[in-house]
Image: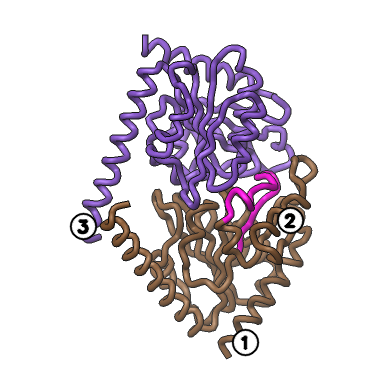
Chain colours: A brown, B purple
Amino acid sequence: MPPKRIRLDKAIVTESDRLAAELAERYDRAGVLVMNLMSSPGAGKTSLLEATARSLSDRFRMACIDGDLATDRDAQRVRKAGMPCTQINTGGGCHLNGKQVRDALAAHRLQDLDILFIENVGNLVCPAVFDLGEHRRVVVSSTPEGDDKPVKYPVAFRLADAVVLNKMDLVGATDFVVEAFREYMDEIKPGLPVLEVSCKTGDGLAGWFEWVAAARDAVGRKVE
Amino acid sequence: MPPKRIRLDKAIVTESDRLAAELAERYDRAGVLVMNLMSSPGAGKTSLLEATARSLSDRFRMACIDGDLATDRDAQRVRKAGMPCTQINTGGGCHLNGKQVRDALAAHRLQDLDILFIENVGNLVCPAVFDLGEHRRVVVSSTPEGDDKPVKYPVAFRLADAVVLNKMDLVGATDFVVEAFREYMDEIKPGLPVLEVSCKTGDGLAGWFEWVAAARDAVGRKVE
């Protein structure tokens, strides 16, 4: 790799880091917990947010920033479930960046929120290396994708604070072995919470809601 | 965006294009059909290659180059099904590039092959914009991902020569509506072949094998 290339890469990372730090400071000043959700396309990030909107709206003031290459389908779904949501369209962009998030924040009053979710572009690779200043990072994986995803996409799983394993209702119809998934996760990041859920049937979602509430409490204490 | 950044981006694209043209010329000189397979993680590219190896090995001399962030699990599966396969590990890289493919070609005698498959990194975004000199580009989509993927990831679907819709065995267990998927595809690229298959049960694979054979014939004629 020629030296010029290295210098430019470094400059880009630094700008990205600066923005992430600016966002993190802004979240903390407002006392809002920010969670960055990432997954393969169709793993169930939006379904998880719909369920969260329906079940936790009485308890927390929540909002969402949603990233997609195209359409505002996901934002519409989240809004319909009762959570304010701003759609970012990246065009061809493979991840959300700090500038897009900063721009989208204009639509939200952070100090009036308890939790802000960022639903990243469906992509198990690129979003993992872009810090959006979030407090918690959640990877949603789903049983039809196969139980070997943690070892095949280690970066995203290694940088996560929790894994939501969705579509447990389909586990019997696939070759997915829950124990194998958990063993692969132990290989990549031992001790990471793996929450088995089905957004379709609702099974296991109580565990997710509890995890969200605990994260909210932890950040709350930090701010006070 | 500062002018320096624009110039560098342009230079990178040009180098990538040059490599793609070099690869395309090499494929044509050897008279080998090259197919670039892309999809979300876990949609079934490897399963499709396993089925293809098992069913078409008597008819075509085939080989595979497999791209993954980590592990050689996919290459092992393809080899076990009877197709020689070279694994590329990208580290964190979100797509295969021309240089990686060129290096991997050293392990294959192209002139002794009828078909070379390139299984790209599981990612429905980035691989779409990197030309590897291939003759045909196939997107594998799967029913549990949801029927709206063509409109949400339009770039990959628009640049495809065919879509293999896998995991049709799970369609009854999900909210996937085949007609909706086909309508979204018509919106993105009217007339594109959409081949419904289940790599698990084997249903529909005959249509895929036929499409592969027709593509092989078409490229064969071009070379002669």
Q: Closer to us: mark 1 or mark 3?
A: 3
Q: Which residue is mark 3?
A: B4
Q: Is residue A69 left or right of residue B175?
A: left
A35 to B208, vertically: above or below: below
- Element type at marker 1? helix
Q: CA distance from mark 2 to mark 1?
A: 31 Å
Measuring from the top left, give residue A143's x and y in whole percent: 70, 48
Chain letter of the residue beneath label 2 in the structure image: A
Name which residue lies at 55% across and 74% down.
A135
Residue in the picture at 38% in, 67% down:
A16
Q: Which label is found at residue A35?
A: none
* Rendered location of residue A92, percent (x, y): 40, 49
Residue at (48% x, 72% y) in the render: A133
* Extent of the magenta region: A138-154
Q: Are marks 3 and 2 on the same chain?
A: no
The foreground one among A80 and A212 is A212
The subunit carrying tag 3 is B
For badge 3, the amino acid type reads: Lys
Label for residue A221?
1
Residue B66, position as x, y percentages in the image: 53, 36
**Chain of the residue on which disc 1 is drawn:** A
Badge number at residue A182: 2
Residue drawn at x 48%, y 60% is: A129
Task: Measure how far apart labels 1 and 3 are at the Cα level.
Answer: 45 Å
Q: CA distance from mark 3 to mark 2?
A: 47 Å
Residue A147 within the magenta-colored segment of the rendering: yes
